[in-house]
């Protein structure tokens, strides 16, 4: 059984889908149809705990971020590799990441 390719964001609704993310600190990635954001935490334990919570959601979506962690900082890039660009999965995961950082 072959996995269906994830469709890219609908061009008609793309700006509408990205606007709240851009307003919340997400940025386009030069040379790629991707978004990125740097998350800052008080310390390593908080950063790693957040990554663990995000990982559970990513696994449920079967959509995994490109990310790296250095002490209290997590740098995240979201892209859907099977459509080589942004998809609804990226929007959903970005919103979840933002929600998990809310106080």
Image (spheres, helix red, strand yellow):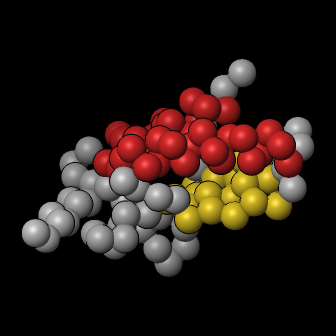
Is the N terminus in the top left, top right, bottom left or bottom right quadrant? bottom left
Frontmost residue, 10 versus 43: 43
Instruction: Report which quarter residue 50 is drawn in.
Output: top right
Residue 74 at x, y percent in the picture: 73, 54
Residue at 69 percent across and 64 percent down: it is 68
Q: Tag count in the figure?
A: 0
Residue depicted at x 13% and y 71%:
2
- In the picture as drawn, the residue positioned furthest to the front comes out as 1
Residue 11 visible (yes or no): no
Residue at 27% across, 54% down: 9
Q: Nearer the viewer, residue 55 or 90?
A: 55
Q: Describe residue 9's horizontal placement relative to residue 29 as left or right.
A: left
- Residue 18 x, y percent position in the rendering: 42, 45
Farthest residue in the bottom direction?
Answer: 31
* Residue 44 rendering spot, x and y as whole percentages: 85, 48
> Does residue 72 appear to the left or right of 14 in the view shown?
right
Q: Residue furthest left?
A: 1
Q: Is residue 49 above or below residue 4?
A: above
**Vertical placement of residue 97 versus 84, above or below:** above
29 displayed left or right of 79: right
Please give the name of the residue rendered at 46% of the width and 48% of the height, measured from the top-left corner.
58
Residue 63 seen in render: yes
Question: Does residue 10 appear to the left or right of 36 in the view shown?
Answer: left
Quadrant in which the C terminus is drawn: top right
């Amino acid at each position: 059984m072959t996995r269906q390719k994830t469709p890219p964001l609908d061009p008609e609704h793309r700006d509408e889908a990205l606007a709240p993310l851009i307003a919340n600190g997400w940025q386009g990635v030069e040379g790629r149809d991707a978004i990125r954001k740097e998350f800052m935490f008080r310390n390593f334990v908080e950063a790693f705990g957040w990554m663990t919570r995000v990982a559970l959601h990513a696994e449920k979506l079967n959509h995994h971020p490109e990310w790296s962690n250095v002490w209290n900082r997590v740098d995240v890039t979201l892209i859907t590799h099977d459509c080589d660009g942004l998809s609804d999965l990226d929007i959903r995961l970005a919103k979840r990441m933002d929600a998990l950082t809310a106080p």
